[in-house]
Image: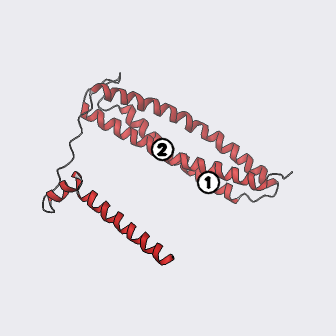
Amino acid sequence: MFIGLSKFLFSSAAALVAAAGLVFSASPAVQAVQAAGPAQETPPPPARPAASPERLERLYQNELKALDAQAAHLERTDEIIARAQAKIDELAAKGLDISALQEALGDYQDAVADAQGYHDKAASILSAHAGFDANGKVTDAAQARVTVQEAGRALRDARQNLRPALHRLLRALRETWRDNRPRP
């Protein structure tokens, strides 16, 4: 019984694989690649169209808003660190193991310092407003594009450094609480 069933399953699977190979080899995308052959190069992707001045101005204003929001977040980090340290001290006074919390808090403090550096870089790029006038209007589109890209990258780097460290700190606090909470 099992031999007949296994032969049936094997032959069915082989038929499905063969049918799939025929279908995919007959698709236009595969035929185009086969027609191109190994000696021909694929054409480069089309060049990105230049951003309009209005779009660059809008992006610049968005980066300024993001910078302000990030500054507000960074201002709150001192409070977060102080509250976490108070909780760690409270748990240490109870004689609980706080090594994971201390490590997570140290990582968070390091991430805050790194994020502040990236934030300061973004602030200096945006305050120089290369390619923009004092009112945020584009004066040089190429330079404005570089300004928006570099500021966005610095803001993103700050966020990407800070967010995971905060999540690790909160997770460590949650796990410590879960492991040491009073049982009814």
- Classify residue 17 by image quadrant: bottom left
Q: Residue at x 82, y 54 (%)?
A: 94
Q: Nearer the viewer, residue 169 or 36?
A: 36
What amino acid is found at the position of numbered circle 2 in the picture? Answer: Ala
Side (left or right) of 83 relative to 143: right
In three-dimensional space, the C-alpha distance between marks 2 and 1, rounded to whole angstroms, equals 17 Å
**Residue highlighted by disc 1:** 106
How packed is label 2: few (under 14 Cα within 10 Å), some, or many (20 or more)?
A: many
Q: Residue at x 38, y 70 (%)?
A: 11
Q: Are marks 2 and 1 in contact (CB under 8 Å)?
A: no
* Residue 117: x %, y % from top left: 47, 45
Q: Nearer the viewer, residue 154 or 25?
A: 25
Q: Residue at x 78, y 55 (%)?
A: 180
Instruction: Identify the secondary structure beneath mark 1.
Output: helix
Q: Farthest residue in the right direction?
A: 184
Instruction: Identify the secondary structure beneath mark 2.
Output: helix
* Residue 98: x %, y % from top left: 72, 57
Q: Nearer the viewer, residue 25 or 50?
A: 25
**Residue highlighted by disc 2:** 158
* Residue 166: x %, y % from top left: 59, 47
Above or below, 181 against 155 in this view is below
How packed is label 1: few (under 14 Cα within 10 Å), some, or many (20 or more)?
A: some
- Classify residue 14 by image quadrant: bottom left
* Residue 157: x %, y % from top left: 45, 45
Q: Farthest residue in the bottom direction?
A: 3
Side (left or right) of 43 relative to 84: left
**Colouring scheme, one of rainbow, by chain, secondary structure, one colour:** secondary structure
Q: Nearer the viewer, residue 169 or 18?
A: 18
What amino acid is found at the position of numbered circle 1 in the picture? Answer: Gly
Q: Farthest residue in the left direction?
A: 39
